[in-house]
Each structure stands twice: as C-alpha cells, then as structure tokens.
Amino acid sequence: MGVGSLLPFPREFADVEEFYWLWILATTAYGVGDTLTTLTLHRYAPAVVEGNPIVAAVLARFGFAGLAAWKIAVICLCLAVSVRAARQWEDRFSYYFPPVVLTLVGSFFTVYNLRLLLG
C-alpha cells in the first residue's frame, strides 16, 4: 500500500501538507478557541447569554459535553464536505470553503468571547 492510497484526495488536486494545515487552523480556532472561551464565559460570566440559539439549546439540554459533541459534529461534517470536494467533485471552492469558514468564524468568536470575558 503506497502513500498515495492513504491520501484523502488525488495528489495532483492539492498538497497534503496544505490540507493538514487548513484543518489544524480550523480545529484550533473553532474547535479549541471558540469552545474554551464559550465554556469560560458560561462558568465565570453567567450574565452573558449565548447568542447562537442552537448552541444555547445544546448547552441548556446537554451541558458542556453537548457543546463538545456539537463542535465535533460540525467539524466532521465540514471535513467530509472538504474531502468529498477533493476526491469526487474536484471542486476547489468546496475544498477550501469549510476549513476557511471554520477558521474565520472560530477566530472571530474567540476574540469576541475574550472581549466579553475581559469586559
């Protein structure tokens, strides 16, 4: 089994290292940064209300474990779209869009939550 068969897409479509870095950034910003700052706000600033109705419902019903499960589900869905875009659709927009959006959204809300936390 060669390295090429382990790649999530044809080598000529995109660079594997680029793929990994896109998803490391997305996971760090959305999965870690936004999640940790959201949890910190809920614990140390209870007067701050969650603005996302889906996240608010998940937190109310399932708590912090539910938030983690929600974030993992979103990341997995976006990752599946990105891989499918590269493997089957050969669509560069759909390949780049999910990790870029997660990185931007995660970064924005991490900074926004920190701003709320620090007053």
Image: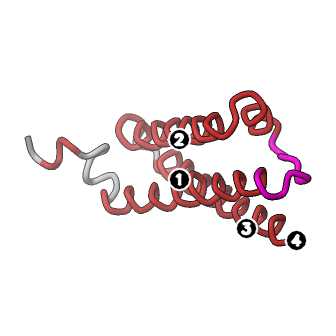
Q: What stretch is highlighted in magenta?
A: 43-52
**Local secondary structure at mark 3:** helix
Q: Identify the residue shown where x is 42% and y is 36%.
A: 84
Q: Position of residue 17 (x, y in %)?
A: 32, 62
Tell me the amino acid under the disc marked 3. Answer: Val
- Label 3 belongs to which residue? 111
* Sooner in the amino-acid sequence: mark 3 or mark 2: 2
* Sooner in the amino-acid sequence: mark 1 or mark 3: 1
Front one among 85 and 119: 119
* Sooner in the amino-acid sequence: mark 1 or mark 4: 1
* Sooner in the amino-acid sequence: mark 2 or mark 1: 2
- Label 1 belongs to which residue? 99
- Label 4 belongs to which residue? 119
Tell me the amino acid under the disc marked 2. Answer: Cys
**Local secondary structure at mark 2:** helix
Q: Position of residue 106 (x, y in %)?
A: 65, 57
Give the CA distance from mark 1 to mark 4. Answer: 30 Å
Q: Do the residues labelled 2 and 1 touch (CB within 8 Å)?
A: yes
45 falls in the magenta region? yes
Q: Identify the residue shown where x is 55% and y is 35%.
A: 73
* Sooner in the amino-acid sequence: mark 4 or mark 2: 2
- Label 2 belongs to which residue? 78
Horizontally, residue 17 falls left or right of residue 76, namely left
* Sooner in the amino-acid sequence: mark 3 or mark 4: 3
Query: Comparing marks 3 and 2, which lies closer to the viewer?
Result: 3
Give the CA distance from mark 1 to mark 3. Answer: 18 Å
**Local secondary structure at mark 1:** helix
Front one among 9 and 111: 111
Give the CA distance from mark 2 to mark 1. Answer: 7 Å
